[in-house]
Amino acid sequence: MKLAGTKGTVRAVNFMIDRVRAWGRGEGRVGGPGGWESVERTGGKGWACEAAGVRRFAPASVRSRPGPVVWVIPGLLTLAVTLTGIGHAQPWRDELATWSAAIRPVPDLVRMTRTIDAATGPYYLLMHGWTALAGASPTALRLPSALAMAVAAALTARLGAMLVGSRAGLLAGLLFAVLPVTSRYGQEARPYALATLFAVLATLLLVEALRRPTWRRWAGYALAVAALALLHLIALTLLAAHAVVVLLTAARGPAAVVDPPGRSRAEMPDASRPCRRHPWRSTQPRDRAPVERHGCHGAPQTPAAFHPATRSSAGGTPRVSPHPGSREHGTDAPEAERQDVTGEAREGSAPGRRVLAGWLLALVPVVVFVTPLALVARGQRGRQLDWVDPARLPDLAALPGALAQSGVVGGFVLALAALGAARLGRRALLPVAAVLLPVVLVFAAGTIVPLWVTRYLVFTVPFACVLAGAALAAARVTPAPARTPGTATPAEPECTATPAAAGRTAAPAEAEQGPTSPRGRIAAGIAVVVLAGLLGLPDQVALRRTHEWPRSAPVDYAGAAGIIRAEQRPGDAIVYSPRDGWLFPDLGMAYHMGPRLPRDVLVVRDQRQDASLWAVECDDPARCLAGVDRVWLVVTGRRADPPAAVPGAKGDALRAGYTVRQVWPRPGITVALLVR
């Protein structure tokens, strides 16, 4: 039988392994002296098949790739949750700013970013194209965020599967899907959902690049980080976590940080790992065995069955060492071993330098494109963030609840993340750093400049879910039937591991032979995810009523607009107070009333003409109000006497020339009809 290529070789390997196992069960003898690897007998009870490395073989690149179910289910669940009631809550003030910017022509939008919201300018430009296609209804404005959160959930599951395991990845993605914060920002027309997506994507691509560094992977990482920076400048604090991981990988290799669980470097087709060269073997391609084409020549991931056979010291059976550089390869082995060790010491620092250089080069386009944007945004900080208070220590204590949009759920996820970090050990470095370092950096900066805003840290939530997923993957329900070391099931021969083989298979055995079955652990983890969803259910319902924070202080723009629409007459005018705040009563009325909005009698330059989010009113309100018999006054807050709440010359003109006909208080806003 002649089988060419890697697939044919794999089939041949698996066929021979099956026959060896059949021989161990007494179904016939396979092989012969000097050919296929024989393994040590275990007192007549079977063969040490797994311990000796003789197992059904598949390329490492296939084995390390999580199945699509791991990430498809969390993505679909997140999409279903975020689409539920996506248009119920009316747009709040930040979304009104998005709408105002997105409907402007591109030249006017660019002019606006020179005076305000430069950091959000790329997102506004994206939404400009989206609203031209999909419209500006609440559902249409929020749909990109819902899709982004769904993809972020899928990528969170994929990242968890790569760093921890498929079960942990699946549970991390499911947990992310049911959190109130996912629905909150998956139903908001702001850039935080997209920033979350690119934060997870950049981290995922970084892990891939550290394991198998190629220029394509580094280019993908560079694009993801650049997109992250353009959407959310503060999310660049994630690069501090990336820097820690890259430096540690460059110093100690990927095995210290990002190797998959339960797998040695020998099992991974990693281009960053130097291949061993054996002086007594040819390195010419024409002289290599076909089986070695799947990896480096002589690399430890080559199946042990294809290494040259030697005679076991215990008997006359042919025996193969799974380590090509060991002394069991013959008289040249000591010489080869010394040269291999020296070669690795000489070549070991080269991959580390290449990894560090690749990461730094990937950051070059980020620096080039983002630096001008950051400089402009820095100049707007005083006007943009004048409402933000300095950061204080109590803010850190309130962060989990504020970030999760639920105090109970935030504390629950924090506890799970702490348990997961303790369980993972060194593998927790990347997700822990991705959570803690951005929080620490933003908090430290927030004590000096106005920067501490909880929603700016939404991009850290998926990494906390990865840690929580690691804890959920260890949850237990029902103990599996006990097995004694000397007992084997009829369908599975007992495998006795040598010390070296036991070290190689310790981690997978922990996952497969734990005190509970994999299905039981999945069920236990899903039960905890359901509990988290039930704990956050009241907040899920509340955030679909209003996006304001706190939710006890909503602003009913739609209700106020409905009152004016029902009672207005031709020739009516409208006046707003205050006009320079962040509640945007004028934008709220314009959004909900559209072309039926009464004439804004005091405005001399609207938001588009002023290249900002605020309109400019005339200096002499009494003159501008001349000839107007009915005025609709819209003031923020609940006011018993709305004209009395209007300051300055505008208030004087209204009080002197008009009387109040009727007042309609609405949550967070008051409408009054004034007549002469």
Image: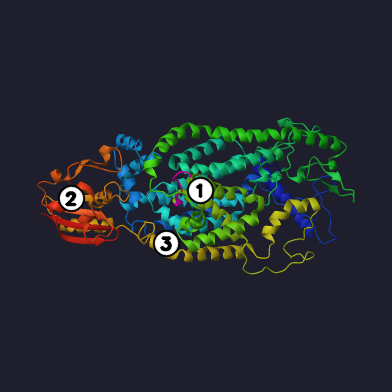
Disc with the residue nearer the chain's start (2 vs 3): 3
| Magenta-drawn stretch contains 489 | no
User: Nearer the observer, disc 2 or disc 3?
Assistant: 2
- The quarter of the image holding the C terminus is bottom left
- The quarter of the image holding the N terminus is top right
- Give the amino acid at mark 1: Phe
- Give the amino acid at mark 3: Gln
Disc with the residue nearer the chain's start (1 vs 2): 1
Tag 3 residue? 540
Tag 2 residue? 652
Q: Is residue 598 visible?
A: no
Rendering coords of residue 16 (x, y %) = 74, 50
Q: Is residue 667 left or right of residue 473?
A: left
Does dot 1 land on a helix, a strand or a loop?
Answer: helix
Rendering coords of residue 307 (x, y %) = 78, 42
What is the spatial separation of the Cα atoms under label 2 and label 3, in whole angstroms?
45 Å
Does dot 2 land on a helix, a strand or a loop?
Answer: helix
What is the spatial separation of the Cα atoms under label 3 and label 1, in whole angstroms?
27 Å
Residue 479 vs 467, above or below: the answer is below
- Give the amino acid at mark 2: Asp
Residue at left 9%, top 47%? Answer: 627
What is the spatial separation of the Cα atoms under label 1 and label 2, in whole angstroms?
44 Å
Rendering coords of residue 193 (x, y %) = 44, 49
- Between 466 and 4, the one lying in front of the other is 466
Say if mark 1 contacts mark 2, CB within 8 Å: no
Q: Quadrant location of residue 231?
A: top left
Residue 81 vs 610, above or below: the answer is below
The residue carrying pointer 2 sits among few (fewer than 14), some (14 to 19) or many (20 or more) residues within 10 Å by Cα, namely some
Span highlighted in magenta in the image: 448-454
Q: Which mark is residue 241?
A: none
User: Nearer the observer, disc 3 or disc 1?
Assistant: 1
Tag 1 residue? 443
